[in-house]
Image (tube, rainbow, N blue to C red):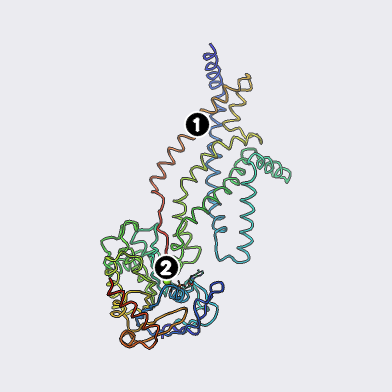
């Protein structure tokens, strides 16, 4: 078990955003998190790497309470891919992938460069290493962001709606890269609205609603035989929209 | 007739006082340059303190100090500051000359303005940049140093350069503590013959040449460093 979340609670001001969330993740699992906007998906991810603090409950990472860990060391082992990419605007593509390795992992330049080139190859961005990040398309930016995260050799990567800010024609390239990343065996939690992708890539799907995990099922079961009425409703709404498209 | 008299006096003042005027130019440039550089360096530190989010008790005290400092310095004339610093330090036994006191004053003054400039620069950098840096395990300090500040400084280049140009002109007030910079050197020359207008026209032309040259050079520097970083704002 790589991650264990027990009875997590989080309030923003007086609004309960996470209400008693529990979850365990095994090494190598790929989990997709579905749920409508505002249900607490981002907050859950952000608690795992302490970008948000939480009010109650416990998060164990590799068996240890994350609050007892050195926060920077913890974060170096937990990758995060943001909806809005957040590539470092002052660095080119290659340096975006090197800076964490040299400044956090204390690797030397050659090692960092080699690793950066390797991951940029994996995401298909080898031809862009010297490009300024502002010259990239959204899809390319997100692929570099994934490479940047992989360079840290994290135990787990958290994806927060990695394709939601992309033009439709770029969604596919990013999803394909995530599928490739899956082959490396890294554990992933992916918040997404891409149902087909969730079906294909994940072994387990969570459905969040109003700060609660309403459903936590193996992927096949989730889509064919959901237990919860809200999940059924959610899936039905999605299928209806699909037909209308 | 009047004109030949006017230019005659100008020529005479320049030739007789060229050494003092050149020294004055040197002092004005020194004051502006040192003031801007020292002010910039300290402002980097102060703006860090001022914008730091997760501040502990020490951080809060430092923040209070910086806020007070910026408010007081920006709210009072540099001429008044110069007199207070120069004579109060003398009373405390610091035996400094006017130029050193002038360098101190202009640095203290520029620090306050550039702290605000850099704070604005830092706030113009998308939050996601800092967050992404933290998310790969950089400390708050490293995130600021390697990711946020390079962008903030780039965004602030025009204002920092402007501060240098303002310093060229505003260091003229340091004549009150006896610094012989451009204005004071010209005034002393003019006073000898009661030709203040002629002397001040010389000063004005010198200031104009210095400010125009500086703004030309700063423009080129800005272009070399690159256009300000434009951001798409984070949506989550
Ligand atoms: N920094 C914040 N301050 C106050 N409220 C927040 C903050 N972040 C999120 N929230 C609120 O928490 C709720 C859950 O947000 P979020 O976790 O982003 O949901 P999701 O990612 O599922 O859309 C929302 O109602 C949102 O407005
Ligand atoms: Mg979200």
Query: In front of the other: label 2 or label 1?
Result: 1
- How far across and how far down the image is residue A194, in percent? 32, 74
Neighbor class of circle 2 (other Cα within 10 Å; few <14, some 14-19, many 20+) is few
Q: Is residue A245 left or right of residue B109?
A: left
- How far across and how far down the image is residue B132, in percent? 43, 66
Q: Which mark is residue A106?
A: 2
Whether A68 is drawn above or below B202: the answer is below
* Residue B234 figure quarter: bottom left
Asked whether mark 1 and ligand 1 are closer than 8 Å, the reply comes as no
The residue at the point 50 percent across, 74 percent down is A70
The residue positioned farthest toward the right in the image shown: B91
* Residue A196 figure quarter: bottom left
Task: Quarter of the image for the C terminus of chain B: give it.
Answer: bottom left
Asked whether mark 2 and ligand 1 are closer than 8 Å, the reply comes as no
Q: Is residue A155 left or right of residue B124?
A: left
Under circle 1, the secondary element is: helix
- How far across and how far down the image is residue A82, in percent? 39, 68
Q: Chain of mark 1?
A: B
Q: Nearer the viewer, residue B72 or A91?
A: B72
Q: Which mark is residue B208?
A: 1
Q: Distance between the Cα atoms at labels 2 and 1?
A: 50 Å
Q: Which mark is residue B64?
A: none
Neighbor class of circle 1 (other Cα within 10 Å; few <14, some 14-19, many 20+) is some
Q: Is residue A67 left or right of residue B132?
A: right
* Residue A34 figure quarter: bottom left
- How far across and how far down the image is residue B110, in percent? 57, 45
Q: Nearer the viewer, residue A168 or A131?
A: A168
The residue at the point 54 percent across, 43 percent down is B34
Q: Chain of mark 2?
A: A
Whether A233 is drawn above or below B17: the answer is below
């Amino acid at each position: 078990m790589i991650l264990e979340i027990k009875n997590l609670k989080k309030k923003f001001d007086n609004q309960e955003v996470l209400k008693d969330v529990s979850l365990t993740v095994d090494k190598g699992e790929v989990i997709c998190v579905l749920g409508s906007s505002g249900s607490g998906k981002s907050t859950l991810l952000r608690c795992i790497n302490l970008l948000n603090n939480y009010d109650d409950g416990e998060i164990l990472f590799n068996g240890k309470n994350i609050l007892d860990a050195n926060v920077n060391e913890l974060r170096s082992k937990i990758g995060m891919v943001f909806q809005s990419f957040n590539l470092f605007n002052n660095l080119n593509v290659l340096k975006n992938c090197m800076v964490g390795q040299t400044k956090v992992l204390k690797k030397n330049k050659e090692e960092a460069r080699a690793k950066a080139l390797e991951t940029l190859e994996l995401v298909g961005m080898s031809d862009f290493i010297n490009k300024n990040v502002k010259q990239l398309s959204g899809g390319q930016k997100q692929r570099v962001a994934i490479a940047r995260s992989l360079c840290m050799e994290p135990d787990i990567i958290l994806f927060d709606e990695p394709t939601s800010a992309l033009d439709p024609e770029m969604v596919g390239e990013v999803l394909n890269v995530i599928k490739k990343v899956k082959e490396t065996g890294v554990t992933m939690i992916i918040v997404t609205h891409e149902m087909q992708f969730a079906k294909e890539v994940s072994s387990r799907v969570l459905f969040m609603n109003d700060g609660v995990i309403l459903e936590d099922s193996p992927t096949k079961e989730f889509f064919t035989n959901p237990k919860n009425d809200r999940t059924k409703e959610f899936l039905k709404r999605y299928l209806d929209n699909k037909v209308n498209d | 007739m009047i004109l030949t008299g006017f230019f005659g006096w100008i020529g005479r003042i320049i030739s007789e006082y060229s050494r003092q005027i050149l020294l004055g130019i040197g002092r004005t440039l020194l004051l502006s340059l040192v003031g801007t550089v020292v002010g910039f360096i300290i402002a980097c530190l102060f703006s860090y303190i001022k914008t730091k989010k997760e501040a502990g008790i020490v951080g809060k005290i430092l923040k209070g100090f910086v806020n007070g400092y910026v408010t007081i310095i920006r709210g009072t004339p540099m001429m008044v500051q110069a007199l207070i610093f120069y004579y109060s330090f003398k009373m405390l036994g610091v035996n400094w000359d006017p130029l050193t006191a002038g360098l101190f004053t202009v640095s203290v003054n520029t620090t306050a303005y550039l702290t605000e400039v850099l704070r604005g620069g830092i706030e113009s950098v998308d939050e996601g940049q800092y967050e992404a840096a933290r998310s790969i395990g950089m400390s708050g300090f490293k995130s600021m140093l390697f990711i946020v500040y390079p962008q903030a400084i780039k965004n602030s280049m025009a204002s920092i350069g402007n501060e240098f140009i303002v310093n060229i002109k505003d260091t003229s007030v340091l004549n009150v503590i006896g610094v012989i910079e451009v204005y004071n050197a010209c005034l002393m020359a003019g006073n000898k013959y009661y030709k203040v207008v002629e002397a001040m026209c010389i000063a004005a032309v010198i200031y104009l040449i210095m400010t125009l040259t500086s703004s030309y050079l700063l423009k080129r520097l800005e272009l070399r460093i690159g256009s300000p970083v434009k951001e798409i704002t984070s949506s989550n």
